Structures are given as C-alpha cells and as structure tokens.
Amino acid sequence: MSDFIKGSGDGCGKEGGCGCSSGSAVNSHTDHRETDMPQTRRGFMKAATALAMITIAPGITLFATGGPAKARPLDEAASPKIRWGMLIDASKCDDGCTKCVSACSKENGWKDNGRPDTDAQWIRAVTLKNRKTGATATLPLMCQHCEEPPCVDVCPTGASFKRADGIVLVNKHTCIGCRYCMMACPYGARSFIHEPLEDQKDHAPRGKGTVESCTLCVHRIDEGRLPACVETCNAEAGGALMFGDLNDPNSEISKRIATYASIELRSGLQLNTGVRYQNI
Amino acid sequence: MTSMRIFKFILSIWIMVIGVSLPGQLSAAESSLLPTIAKGKGDKCVLPTEYMRRNHMDLLDHQRDETVLDGVRTKQFSLKGCVSCHAVKGTDGKAVTVKDPKHFCASCHNYAAVHIDCFDCHASRPGEKDQFGGLKSKPAGHDVAALKSYLHSGSQTGVLTGQQTSLRGRNK
C-alpha cells in the first residue's frame, strides 16, 4: 500500500474529494500529508504494508493492493512526472471470470443492452489462442493507455487526448462523434453511444453521440483510490491486476516489469502502452 | 329612476367584486408564469446569487475544461456541486431529474427558453449516496478490507483454457 504512496509522486497532500468535480458539502476524508501524518496512522500504514506483502514464489513479493493512496490536492493538476499503468498477469485470470468487467460496468454505469455490435464495452474478457501451439490465455482487454495513442493522432477536434499522467481520455465536450478514433484504435477499445441515456453515474458523464472508453477510473485515481477493476480483482478474484506509477522505479509495478518479462499487445506498433501483460 | 338606482347599485357591487378578485387572479397567473426556483442547501451560494444568475455558465465552462483536461477537481464551481446543493425532492422523496419542471436548472431554463446540453451526459440529480447530504465516496482506508480479503484468498494460478477469439473481435 505505502509503496504506491511513494509511487504516486511528490507534492501530494490531501486525500479527499469526490469524483468528477463534486461539490458535496460533506467531506469525510482527512488530510494525511506524509510529513504531518499522525504517528498512529503512520504506524498503521506500515503495518498494513507489511501485511500486504505476500510471497507468491521464492523471491517474488506482490503488494496486494495499493493505487495512488494519496490523492492530489483538489486544485492541483495531474502531474506529468507520473505515468499511471497497469500490469495484468494472465496466468491469474480464471477462464470465465468477468469480475473486472462487471465492476467496471457497475462503477461507470455502462451496461449490456443485448446488442453486442453497438453496446458500450469499456473492458472485456478476451481469450487468446496461439495458433501453432493451441495454448490459450484469458485476459481483460481495455484501452491500453498508449504513450503514442493513435486515437489522439486522428481526432479532428482534439477531444481525444492524453492527460499529463498518461491517461488517455475523451473530452466529451468537444467530441463530435466522428468515430475516427474507434477506427484508429488497434485494440478496438472504444465504443460509441448510440442511444440517449438517463441517470448516468455522477462521476462518469456519458451521453449519446460521443465516443468513450476505459478512463482508468480517473475519478478514483484523483481521489487516491484504485481503479474499480483492480480493486475488485484483488478483493474477489485472482489478483491479476496491478496498478501503479510506471515512471517511479521504486513502485511495485515498475519493479515487477523490470524483473519479469511482460509484453505490450501488438508491440510492433510501438505505442508503448501503459497496460502491460504477463504470462500470455 | 328607481330601476336606474338599482342598476347603479348592482353595477357598483359588480365592480367591487371584480376589484377584489382581480388582483388575486393576476398574482396567481403571475406565479405560474415565473419560474419557481428551489432554495439550495446552506445559507448562500458559492458566489452572490445575482452574480451566479448572470455568470454560472462561464464558471461551469471554465471548470469543465480544468477538470477534464487537467484533473483539477476543486469543488466551488463544479456542476456536481450545483446538482447536489440544489436538488429538489419529488413526490416520491427522491431528487427529481431535469425532465421535471421543478428541477432547479429546468425551472429557469424552461422559463428563459434556453436549452441546456449538460444533462445529456451529466447526471441531473445527485448520486444515490450523495442525495441530500449523504457521503458519495467510501471513507478513506476502505482498501484495507479489500486487502484483507485478498490476503485470505491467497494467490491463484489460472488454468488456461477457453475458446479462440480474435483480438479485435468483441467478446461478449
């Protein structure tokens, strides 16, 4: 846990706030800047970190959960020093498990209307098969949050953009629904909203005529929480998803990537994706 | 003469009746034409009401870019804040959506005949947990529960089986 606290970069202070620009008058979150964190809480965090560390193989430790943990102050912009990324261990994805998918759906309010060609799919469970050997791997596939995103290159209005901390998003205020980005995405990660919607989640605005995709749960990250899929997979499934700062060499995700082989999907495109896979 | 007096008397009575009832009728008509603006929570708005009436759209426009593009999530001028603070309860006790003419934004915008697009995408009433002052987010530290359950579940190695699906294909 605290490893990701370090991983979230410097300048962090308040943990708090709500999703998308909430104005809720009630804010239960406490200020716990590393320097002025009460000793008891600091001790608790250390203990939690120790607890969180489990041995999965000789010499390999995995931090069970983590995430930004320290939210940025509400008035601070996303930092370019950070690059949020995800590491997915396909060997821990059980065949048929769709907990990450349902967690995302519940968190962000998109749902299956029984029209697979047009329904929103921010994340989906995909099974890959090696044609030569027949070996298969099940894994979640979503926006890969490329460093060089083709969707951003083709967008005529600049609505498809990459935030300073590496999260690729659609600014729905300027999206004209042309769907060039959907064509450009090598992962088929984006979908278009065809029908008028009602009762969207207040932290995940989405509406007819715009393109959307995985936001890496940007509203959660900004308040110091893990993306919904990661949190759910850690709590209820195999713990296949790890989230953290790829720019911080001391973050657990960086250490794992540096130590064990991982790949980008369609690496030949040299997009330097923020989402990486292991054991495919 | 007598009939004329009676006529005048009736006329004066009638004029009195009209005179008494007309102002009432006018005010009733007036109140149904003017927007009925629900009072928000708290003592005052984030800025003086007069200023907000004229400039709320600019404040929201500025804030939306800061939030979406940079991730700045200050609360003073957030749309979510407006929606939360100015929520209007419907007959079922829940907050009404923008489709209801009593909705804070709808009441004025319907009157002014100015269409708003905000709620094509944004929620026009507070999230379930946020309705009328509830907490939206789980308190900090809830991750510990997730962590505990993860620790108890232990690590697993998935069995790699399944059907072939192309990477580009949409797997339901």
Image: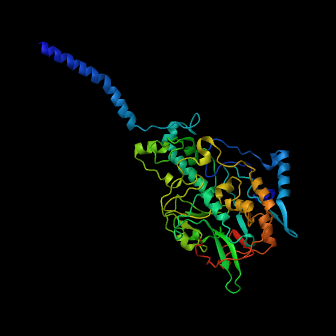
Quarter the N terminus of chain B occupies: top left
Q: At 60% from the left edge and 58% from the top edge, which residue is drawn? A: A108
Q: At which x and y percent is residue B35?
A: 43, 38
Which percent across, then down, holds residue B78? Answer: 58, 47
Q: Does A155 sit above or below residue B137?
A: below
Quarter occupied by residue A126: bottom right
Q: A119 left or right of A233? A: left
In the rendering, at what x and y percent does residue B77 appear? 58, 45
Task: Say whether residue B122 is visible.
Answer: yes
Residue at figure coordinates x 18%, y 17% from the top left: B8
Give the residue drawn at x 67%, y 85%: A131
- Evaluate whether residue A81 shows in this view: no
Q: Quadrant of the C terminus of chain B?
A: bottom right
Q: Is residue A119 above or below residue A26?
A: below
Q: Residue at left 55%, top 54%?
A: A200
Residue projecting furthest to the top: B2
Picture coordinates of residue B108, whole percent (x, y):
45, 42
Residue A265 lies left or right of residue A115; in this view the side is right
Judge left or right: residue A243 versus residue B108.
right
**Colour scheme shown:** rainbow
Q: Nearer the viewer, residue B164 or B86?
A: B164
> How many numbered circles does the render carry?
0
Residue at the right extreme, as displayed: A58
The residue nearer to you, when weighing B72 against B2, is B2
Decide which of A174, A224 is in the foreground and name it: A224
Depth check, front residue: B48 or A94 = A94
Q: Is residue B83 above or below residue A200?
A: above
